[in-house]
Amino acid sequence: MNASTDLFDSRALRYIDCYGQRFMREGTYRYHVLSRQEQGLESREPCTIKVGPRKGEGKNGSKMSQHTVQLRWKKGRFSSGSDELEIEVGDIVLWNCPDPAAPPYEIVGDQEFFASARMVNECGFTHAFGTPGSYAWADAHGSKLGGVVHVKEVSCASRDDLAQWQQRLSKAALVMIADGKVQPPEIEIVAGQTVYFAIVTCKGMSITDKRLLGKSGGAGRGGHAANCA
Amino acid sequence: MATILAAIDEGGANTLLGDALASIPTLSKSGSGSLGPFTAGYSVQGTFAGGTVDLIAPSTVRIEHLRFNWQMTLSFGIDLNDFLPHFCLPQVCVDIPCVGHVCTPKICVSWPTIGVSVPFGDFVEATADFGIDVSLSGGQWKVQILVQNLSQLQFGPATAGILVLIGAAITPLLLAIPFIGPFLAVAVDLILAAIGVAGLTGFLGPILSPFLSGLKIPVYQQDKHFKFLPASGPVDPDVFIELDAVSAQIQHSDEDELVLSVDISP
């Protein structure tokens, strides 16, 4: 991976990205994990998330449990560990494919709220920034939402420096998006840290590196205007 | 049978051979070789220059400080996984208001293989002992000197700086790799140490040495059926003589001379 590919886009997830979706209603939700190379969806069996009633407190006394789905890329297809996942209302499911050789992919659910390329309510996107610089991002679906991530350079002259840096990597920076606002619009992290973009309420947006959107900074792929602002 | 003798002293030989070296066109070669732990491709070209002639009886022409000026482009790939530590982004957790504690999984980084291409140049010098070769081929006499012995190559001062050039070529490539920042200096140092000056001269020596060891310098060339006098009229045609034998040797009297002896007949 080099600087020209150190881009971020919730519409095209890479191995250093995660997509998380919270399920607030009971039901059965089907989804596919698709790369741009894949075709012939009709022949594929979807994965399923069965959302049942909340039975009590989640882990550590919270009202939410997290379920992490580690995707595998093999023989030209993505697969999850199991095709069916059972969770409770309010739980969050987090997807990540840790294979650097996997192509960019998206999570495509069978309902409008459930899609990494166009994120709606109670979901999130994470990206680990590995190269120093200032990264402006915007919504590829045309809303005015956007921000900047400033990534500071790190140099480690000793093992202690390295240990301190790695300690810092375990802390993410949080960007909250709700009611048409981004808070904070600008954040500063060090190279290697992760930013978690938490979308509380929105009618459909992406977190897209502005370099991918051209001069207009407007809708790129899948130009579906959103009303988030 | 008559014999023509021509002789040049060391000063004349310096001029003759200097001109002959300068007339040799640019030589070039490409291939691959071991550069430390890497397999490197190269393309090199160069020209000869300089040298001091010492004529040594009976048949050795020694050129000291024979110089070969060369320019090379070196290309090789570096699998950074061989030099950088295994690195993983740790599990990262955030507390999202009204939602709860969310964590990403540990994600391990795979370092890429980078391609490096470095142009550079310098010279090598050696002392070469040439033997005299006389041959008749295709109706033409040819006297040339061929390398019979070559001293160890002495590299010019710029060669030691090639490692610095390689480091300078690698650094911007590494800078573009995400997450490498804290490991950058270590990576460059390890890569250059893996090559080392010994690896570099060990790589260059076998590539450059054949240019010198394979050197042939022409001294004299003439048709066996030699036009001695051109025609000067319809009744005065060209006059030819035959060069029946040619020999060359170094003779020492009050000074060393390269003596060319040509037996002629009408």
Image (cartoon, rainbow, N blue to C red):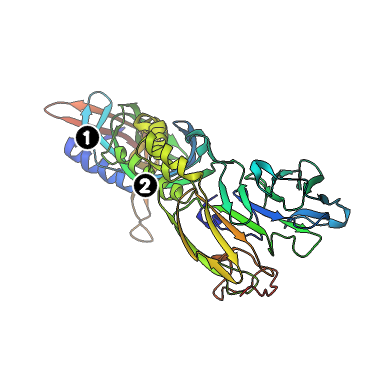
Label 1: chain? B
Image side of residue B123 versus residue B252, left or right:
right
- The circle on residue B23 is none
Q: CA distance from mark 1 to mark 2?
A: 40 Å
**Frontmost residue, B258 versus A9:** A9
Q: Which residue is at the front of the view, A138 or B92?
A: B92
Identity, as a three-letter code, of the amino acid under mark 1: Val
Percent across and percent down for residue A139 are 61, 69
| In the rendered image, the vertical position of residue A147 relative to residue B16, given as above or below | below
> Please, which residue is most extreme toward the top here?
B58
Tag 1 residue: B53
Label 2 sits on a secondary structure element that is helix
* Residue density around tag 1, few if under 14, some if 14–19, many if 20 or more, within 10 Å: many
What is the three-letter code of the residue carrying label 2? Ala
- Indicate the chain on which mark 2 is placed: B
Mark linked to residue B168:
2
Please state the horizontal and vertical placement of residue B158, each as a whole percent of the image: 28, 41
Q: Is residue B226 visible?
A: no
Quadrant housing the N terminus of chain B? top left
State the residue lying farthest toward the left: B254
Measured from the top left, where is residue B136 in percent x and y? 42, 35
